Amino acid sequence: MMTERRAADHQPKATERGGVVEPPGRTAIMAIAAHPDDVESWCAGTLARAVDAGAEVRLLLVTSGDKGASDPAADPRAVARQREAEARAAAKLLGIAEVAFLRHADGELEETRALRGELVAWVRRWQPAILFTHDPVHPLPPYLAHRDHRIVGRVALDAVYPFARDPLSFPEHRAAGLAPHAVREVWLFASAGADAYVDITAGFARKLAARLAHASQTPDARALPESWRGRAAQIGAPAGLALAEAFTILRLD
């Protein structure tokens, strides 16, 4: 049996880095998000800067946002098709190398072995060094965070630690040629406990353009730039940054 000390040594730990941090550089990054516009909201500026630094970024969307329409007569299948097209356009603007869709029903996610297995498979397929996903423990907004966000964050964390790493977990993946893979860090976005700030001044224009690519989710495209600049300024203020995104960073190795 693993001693308490050894068990503690193998737990994901909050990184000792705090304050202003640099985005990841030349490495493989995977982002797992619940809905097509989630990364634009919370981490697109950082991902844009990471791409500039040589990172290869891939995005896995668990739902296609098929409930994201104000018209009660809208066809969810048509909504999903439009939102997937918008997600691809936004990803191209950010320099994201690949986007994949699991196409689970929007608002109906559950924390199941099947979903966990899907995420493990994609982690093993793409083999990222760093994962970006929702904070499921201290989400924003507190108490009212979207249920899909909380579930995706929780299942994604479980997928990378320990399941994607452990060779005896989901052994059926071996038949598909998917080997175990250990993720080095997880960057949690939409995190009420965030204490690591990235200067997104150089990535803000692309973050904004990517968000505007989600036209179906943008009632007033003229007002959005000012409000989003104000939000990025508010996030960066505690770290003395003009425009920022904030994260809780977990070190898994």
Image: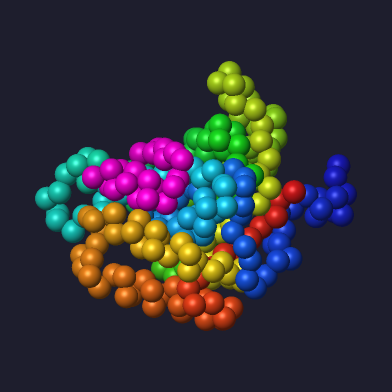
Please indicate, yes or no, whether residue 108 appears anywhere in the rendered image.
no
Residue 59 percent coordinates (x, y)? 46, 44
* In the image, farthest residue toward the top: 175
Foreground pick, 107 / 160 = 160
Foreground pick, 99 / 153 = 99
160 shown above or below 225: above
Foreground pick, 212 / 187 = 212
216 shown above or below 141: above
Q: Image quarter for residue 60?
A: top left
Residue 213 percent coordinates (x, y)? 29, 54
Q: Residue at x 49, y 77 (%)?
A: 242
Q: Residue at x 39, y 59 (%)?
A: 206
Q: Which residues fall within the magenta stretch?
A: 82-103
Please indicate, yes or no, whether residue 236 appears anywhere in the rendered image.
yes
Residue 185 percent coordinates (x, y)? 66, 52
**231 left or right of 136 in image:** left
Magenta residue check for 189:
no
**207 left or right of 89 in image:** right
**206 left or right of 52 in image:** left
Q: Image quarter for residue 40?
A: bottom left
Q: Residue at x 34, y 44 (%)?
A: 88
Magenta residue check for 92:
yes
Q: How is the image coloured?
A: rainbow
